[in-house]
Image (cartoon, grey):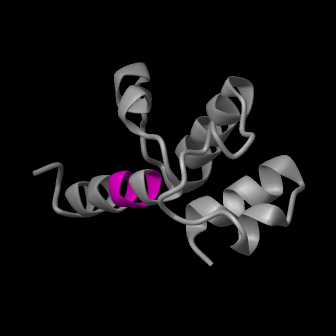
Amino acid sequence: MSTVRELLVELTGTAEYAGQVGDDVDLAASGIDSGDLVRLVLLIEQRLGVEITAEDMEELRTIADYERFVAGRQVAGAAGGA
């Protein structure tokens, strides 16, 4: 299970995100509200050390979007911010 998916399950207490919501399904369309999305971003920042700005959030719609974003930032951080 993906890290972002695990955080969604923890955040919502809904096992639905463990397997029923596809990686490319719009999270808002799947029932995640804006408050949950903000809490998801805060969890990602706290647990994974990846900063997500309000501008970044506008582009992040799916679990796959979040996973790619986090992976890209973690690689950049490991490379010294390059």
Q: Nearer the viewer, residue 70 or 64?
A: 64
- Total count of labels: 0
Q: Residue furthest bottom?
A: 1
Which quarter of the picture shows residue 52?
top left
Left or right, 68 with respect to 15, comes to left
* Residue at 60% across, 53% down: 47
Which is more toward the observer, 65 or 78?
A: 65
In the image, residue 9 lies at what x, y percent?
78, 60
Is residue 34 shown in magenta? no
**The quarter of the displayed image where residue 80 is located:** bottom left
| Residue found at x 81% / y 57% | 10
> The magenta stretch spans which residues?
66-70
Q: Position of residue 16 (x, y in %)?
A: 81, 64
Magenta-colored segment: predominant secondary structure: helix
Left or right of 54 in this view: 33? right
Quadrant that contains the N terminus? bottom right
Q: Residue furthest left?
A: 82
Q: Is 75 drawn above or below residue 50 in the view shown?
A: below
The residue at the far top in this view is 54
Q: Residue at x 72, y 30 (%)?
A: 33
Q: Position of residue 4 (x, y in %)?
A: 58, 59
User: Residue sitting at 43 percent across and 46 percent down?
Assistant: 50
Q: Is residue 57 left or right of residue 29?
A: left
Residue 69 vertical position relative to residue 2 in the rendered view, above or below = above
Where residue 78 appears, as percent x and y from the top left, is 25, 63
Query: Up-down: is 29 above or below 17?
Result: above
